[in-house]
Image (cartoon, helix red, strand yellow):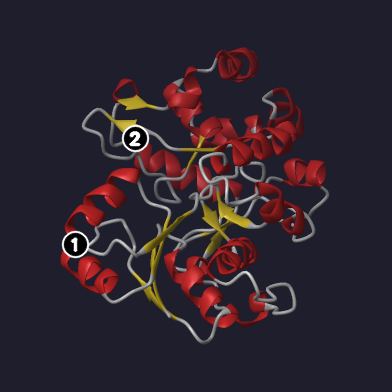
């Protein structure tokens, strides 16, 4: 059996896991970001199934080109889970480009707020406290993340979000960032998809997590799980960020490098959806004004 996998950053990990779970099948990874339509069409023409987490428009456009009515399309969700990294946000310039900090496009909402309000990196350190995190609701994101996960699975009734999340609750932190899963999460998603391809496969007896390389750890950043956030989740945390070059930095260096990048633009040119929430001003303004 031949299967095409089209996902985002999960494409490689899912291919590795599914190849272990279903060794008789051949899996061809074709990420939907920057997809080469010719390559995708050629692979689908010789495949029996297409695993797809990309936009519905991609599916309809592709099937319109590929004349293969018996092709089985198995859709699944991209993963987003921010309980471990509730401070992590995206920010945008007016031209639509991302605002980068020390960890690329993954910004700290607190740090970005502080920079926009005229604080420097050293002053911003005083905002990274358990009291601030608690007041911002960072210690209570688990259920919010579960609710979003359940919502994200709704368009895929053939998949049960509980089959995904319940085994992972024993795995500790299973996300590098809010949208980059670790091996444990990709392996669990692969188990759900393997059952869709072959309902007879015994996915639970194969410890694929122990046989996979964590490609996202090798190629991308791994974000800090703040100590008090970790405590609330019953895991270990630290102010430590792993960068793409595999170096690790602490809080002070993270803020210094981030502010250096922020300073090349104007605060009013930067937009961050989360910073429109009133709670950031309510919690951070009194502390910032007292520290100036």
Q: Residue at x 21, y 32 (%)?
A: 95
Residue 119 visible at all: no
Crowd tier of the residue under label 2, counting other residues whose Cα lies within 10 Å: few below 14, some 14–19, many 20 or above: few
* Number of marks present in the image shown: 2
Query: Label 1 belongs to which residue?
Result: 37
Q: Secondary structure at mark 2?
A: loop
Residue nearer the viewer, 157 or 108:
157
Q: Nearer the viewer, residue 72 or 80?
A: 72
Task: Say which residue label 2 marks.
Answer: 263
Q: Residue at x 56, y 39 (%)?
A: 154
| Of the two numbered discs 2 and 1 in the rendering, the one whose residue sits closer to the viewer | 1
Measured in 3D between alpha carbons, the distance from the residue under mark 2 to the one under mark 1, in whole angstroms, is 40 Å
Residue 213, how many percent across, how many down?
55, 78
Point 43% across, 37% down: residue: 90
- Depth order, front residue of 201/204: 201
Under circle 1, the secondary element is: helix
Query: Of callouts 2 and 1, which one flags the residue occurring earlier in the amino acid sequence?
Result: 1
Position in image of residue 218 (x %, y %): 48, 71
Above or below: residue 247 compared with residue 131: below
90 relative to 153 in the view: left or right = left
Give the residue at x 53% y 86%: 23
Q: Position of residue 108 (x, y in %)?
A: 52, 38
Picture layout, residue 82 above or below residue 253: above
Specify few, some or many for label 1: CA neighbours under 10 Å numbering under 14, 14-19, or 20 or more: some
**Left or right: 89 in relation to 231:** left
Label disc, if present, on residue 249 of the rendered structure: none
Vertical arrangement, residue 181 with respect to residue 95, above or below: below
Instruction: Point out the image quarter for the C terminus.
Output: top right
- Residue 54 appears in the figure: yes
- Name of the residue lying farthest toward the front: 70
């Amino acid at each position: 059996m031949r299967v095409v996998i089209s996902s985002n950053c999960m494409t490689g990990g899912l291919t590795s896991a599914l190849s272990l779970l279903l060794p008789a099948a051949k899996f061809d990874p074709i990420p939907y970001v920057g997809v080469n339509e010719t390559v995708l069409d050629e692979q689908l023409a010789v495949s029996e199934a297409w695993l797809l987490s990309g936009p519905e428009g991609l599916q309809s456009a592709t099937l319109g080109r590929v004349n293969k009515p018996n092709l089985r399309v198995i859709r699944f969700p991209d993963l987003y889970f921010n309980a471990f990294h509730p401070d992590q946000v995206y920010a945008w310039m007016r031209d639509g480009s991302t605002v980068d900090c020390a960890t690329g496009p993954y910004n700290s909402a607190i740090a970005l707020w502080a920079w926009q309000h005229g604080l420097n990196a050293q002053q911003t350190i005083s905002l990274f406290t358990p009291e601030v995190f608690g007041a911002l609701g960072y210690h209570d994101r688990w259920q919010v993340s579960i609710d979003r996960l359940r919502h994200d699975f709704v368009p895929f009734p053939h998949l049960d979000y509980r089959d995904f999340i319940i085994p992972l609750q024993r795995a500790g932190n299973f996300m590098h960032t809010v949208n980059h899963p670790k091996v444990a999460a990709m392996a669990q998603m692969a188990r759900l998809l393997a059952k869709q391809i072959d309902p007879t496969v015994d996915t639970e007896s194969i410890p694929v997590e122990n046989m996979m390389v964590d490609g996202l750890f090798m190629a991308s950043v791994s974000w800090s799980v703040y100590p008090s956030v970790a405590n609330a989740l019953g895991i270990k945390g630290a102010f430590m960020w792993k960068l793409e070059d595999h170096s690790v930095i602490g809080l002070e260096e993270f803020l210094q490098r981030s502010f250096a990048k922020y300073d090349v633009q104007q605060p009013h040119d930067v937009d961050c959806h989360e910073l429109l929430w009133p709670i950031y001003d309510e919690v951070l303004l009194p502390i910032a004004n007292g520290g100036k």
